[in-house]
């Protein structure tokens, strides 16, 4: 009796293993497909992330070029250059502001890089850039 029970038990175990192997192989195939798809998606995300900075640059480039066409290249603003110009002319921020027709706070903000002059003010700065110290003092005397 024990012999038949043992044979029956071994046969059931063998069939169960065979059934499990078939199901496990299907799961392995599906799992491998998912891993392949995930790897492809990761590569695609990586490629798209690399394209984002380029797209942002190209989107911002037309806006920058429009502002450049509005203001001539001689009207480019540089805070350090403004400080240098003011020092070359030997003017205080208040006197420099009078020459430009703006408040002295505006000049201080421009030099501190907290604000940027408008196009009309850039034109005034460009005009003052072309004059010398004596001319600047003469214009300032006229204004006062």
Image (tube, rainbow, N blue to C red):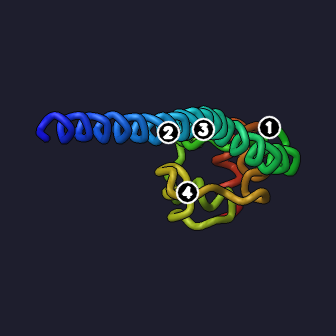
Task: Mark 1 vs mark 3: give the one in front.
Answer: 3
C-alpha separation, residue under disc 1 versus residue under disc 3: 55 Å
Q: Are marks 2 and 1 in contact (CB under 8 Å)?
A: no
Q: Earlier in the sequence, mark 2 or mark 3?
A: 2
The residue beneath circle 1 is 74
C-alpha separation, residue under disc 4 versus residue under disc 1: 19 Å
Q: Residue at x 56, y 43 (%)?
A: 79
C-alpha separation, residue under disc 2 versus residue under disc 1: 64 Å
Q: Quadrant of residue 118?
A: bottom right
Residue 132 percent location from the top left of the image:
69, 36
Task: Assign the C terminus to one quadrant of the image.
Answer: bottom right
Above or below for 140 versus 5: below
Q: Are marks 2 and 3 in contact (CB under 8 Å)?
A: no
Residue 48 percent location from the top left of the image:
66, 39
The residue beneath circle 2 is 31
For the residue pair 24 and 131, the one nearer the viewer reads as 24
The residue beneath circle 4 is 107
**Residue 50 seen in the figure:** no
Q: Earlier in the sequence, mark 4 or mark 3?
A: 3
C-alpha separation, residue under disc 2 versus residue under disc 3: 10 Å
* Count of numbered labels shown in the rendering: 4
Q: Earlier in the sequence, mark 4 or mark 2?
A: 2
Q: In the image, 111: left or right of 41?
A: left
Task: Assign the N terminus to one quadrant of the image.
Answer: top left
Residue 111 percent location from the top left of the image:
51, 49
């Amino acid at each position: 009796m024990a012999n038949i029970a043992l044979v029956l038990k071994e046969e059931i175990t063998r069939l169960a293993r065979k059934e499990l192997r078939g199901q496990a192989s299907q799961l392995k195939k599906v799992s491998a497909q998912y891993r392949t798809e995930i790897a492809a998606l990761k590569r695609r995300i990586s490629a798209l992330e690399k394209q984002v900075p380029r797209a942002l640059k190209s989107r911002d480039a037309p806006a920058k070029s429009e502002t450049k066409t509005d203001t001539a290249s001689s009207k480019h603003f540089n805070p350090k250059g403004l400080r240098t110009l003011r020092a070359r002319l030997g003017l205080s921020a208040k006197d420099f502001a009078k020459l430009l027709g703006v408040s002295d706070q505006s000049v201080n903000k421009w030099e501190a890089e907290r604000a940027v002059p408008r196009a009309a003010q850039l034109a005034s700065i460009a005009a003052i850039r072309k004059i010398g110290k004596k001319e600047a003092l003469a214009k300032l005397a006229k204004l006062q």
